[in-house]
Image: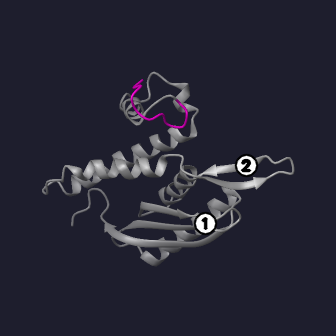
Amino acid sequence: MNEHSDDIGGSGYSLEDLSAYLDRGRVPRINAIERNAECQAILASMQRMGQLSRAIVDEQAAEPLAESWYDGIMREVMREFRAGRDIPLAQSDEGVELVVTEGAIYELIRSVGDGIEGLLVGRVRLEHVEPGAPLDVRVTVSVRFGRAMTEAVDEMRDGIRSAIKRHGDLRVGRVDVTVGDVHLDEGEDE
């Protein structure tokens, strides 16, 4: 375990430790990582990023990648999957407050996108101004060439609303889904 890096979700492990753990195929099993929701979200994101980066590298093999490409992706992953602010879900009469972290909502939104054919989730932004106010969501996606964009965006928007209400019991305000890119399936010719 690297003692000089940030501790992820109170697990005692850093981003570098999680990366090495994933590279080893999650062997030997580390319960502190496997039972930590924030670590699991980061590992899932790293797996998606690995799949996406392999597809991009294959697609753009003729063009050299900028050295900062990987660093930029990792900064975005870390920004999104740090626990972030606590978003209040409910408060009991005894004063106990139930919260969900922004990082958990980011992962929930990304999992919605993973379930939609021909859609890749890019940037996710949350706006939650004050307790009790609706949660506004902004997502940028890439849609596979040939897939109807309006249909994909509607499916993503509806999926986000449903998932947040079902899992977070939050009021959902605006859900803006922007198509920022079009991609080809892996192995498809341009």
Q: Earlier in the sequence, mark 2 or mark 1?
A: 2
Q: Is residue 100 left or right of residue 124?
A: right
Residue 29 visible, this angle: yes
Q: Neighbour class for label 1 at 10 Å: few (<14), some, many (≥20)?
A: few
Residue 91 image offset from top left, x and y in percent: 78, 53
Per the model, the C-alpha gap separating discs 2 and 1 is: 18 Å
Q: Main secondary structure of the magenta part?
A: loop
Q: Residue at x 26, y 55 (%)?
A: 56
Instruction: Check residue 58 for magenta coloring.
Output: no
Q: Secondary structure at mark 1?
A: loop
- Residue 97 % position (x, y): 75, 49
Q: Residues within 10 Å of mark 2 (few under 14, many from 20)?
A: few
Residue at the spot 25% in from the left edge and 52% down from the top edge = 69
Numbered mark located on residue 98 in the image: 2
Name which residue type carries label 2. Leu
Task: Specify the segment rendered in magenta.
Answer: 1-11
**Image vertical order of residue 162 relative to residue 78, above or below:** below
Looking at the picture, which amino acid does disc 1 mark? Val
Q: In percent of the image, x 55 and y 26: which residue is there?
A: 31
Q: Residue furthest right?
A: 93
Residue found 71% across the figure and 59% down from its top: 169
In the rendering, which numbered label is found on residue 129?
1
Residue 4 among magenta residues: yes
Outermost residue toward the bottom? 150
